[in-house]
Amino acid sequence: MHKPFLVIAGNIASGKSTVAKRLADELGLPVYQEPADANPYLEGFYKDMSRYAFRSQLFFLAKGLNQHRQIEARSGGAVLDRSLYEHYLVFAHQLHADGKITDNDFAVLSDLYYGFQDLLASPDLLVMLEASTDQLALRLAGRGATDASIDPLYLQALQQRYSEFVDGWVVCPVLKIDTEQLDPRSEVGLDQLVAMVLERLSLSELS
């Protein structure tokens, strides 16, 4: 039986980690978490984006590539919490547009991304978690100091970038989920959200 490779995407505080862990448990798959805690530049990035943006994105791109290749090598399915696609197409693009990543540095990231993109196996499903910027800001306010310090304008800019990301996505099927209607912070919401994903996977296997 084919075991699916799922990618969980969404803006900061959309609930990706919670959803990824639960789906992995339900499907009996390993979960590959975004390596944010291992990023030595992330804390500095939120204090001085211009100084640390390129190094932070280079770290995420390298780690994302390693995770993707590990998933391919095991050939047994997995759940990936934020992929290299998202880091490059959303975060790196926005930081470049904001002038936090220079043209030369963005060209390096682009060469790396497009040099490997076509060599990677496509996921079976992209689960896109959505919420309004106001709701995301409320969730961030209840988290750690680093998250709570995120500039609301940066969060809003990412929101628009995510809209463009999912509209232009052609790598695999997409399932959009409104996390204000199905809030992964509640057991009921998380149960319903996971059921939607499992139903979509079941329909995909039948088609």
Image: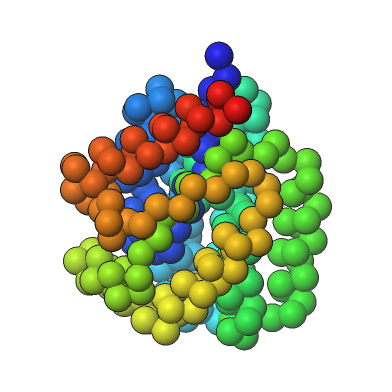
Quarter of the image with the C terminus in it: top right
Residue lying furthest top: 1
Looking at the image, residue 174 sits to the left or right of residue 121; the answer is left
Quarter of the image with the N terminus in it: top right
Q: Is residue 173 above or below residue 156?
A: above
> Of 50 and 180, which appears nearest the observer?
180
How many badges with numbers are in the image?
0
The residue depicted at 36 percent of the width and 47 percent of the height is 17
Which of the 4 quarters of the picture holds residue 18?
top left
Location of residue 117 in the rendering, given as x and y in whole percent from the top left corner: 74, 49
Location of residue 38 in the rendering, given as x and y in whole percent from the top left corner: 45, 52
Residue lying furthest front: 207
The residue depicted at 58 percent of the width and 76 percent of the height is 95
Location of residue 9 in the rendering, given as x and y in whole percent from the top left corner: 48, 53
Q: Is residue 97 above or below residue 120?
A: below
Looking at the image, residue 146 sits to the left or right of residue 91; the answer is left
Looking at the image, residue 194 sits to the left or right of residue 77; the answer is left
> Of 116 and 187, which appears nearest the observer?
187
Location of residue 2 in the rendering, given as x and y in whole percent from the top left corner: 57, 19
Q: Is residue 55 visible?
A: no
Q: Is residue 183 visible?
A: yes
Snapshot colouring: rainbow
The residue depicted at 25 percent of the width and 66 percent of the height is 139
The residue depicted at 63 percent of the width and 82 percent of the height is 97
Which of the 4 quarters of the picture holds residue 134?
bottom left
Q: Is residue 14 above or below residue 77?
A: below
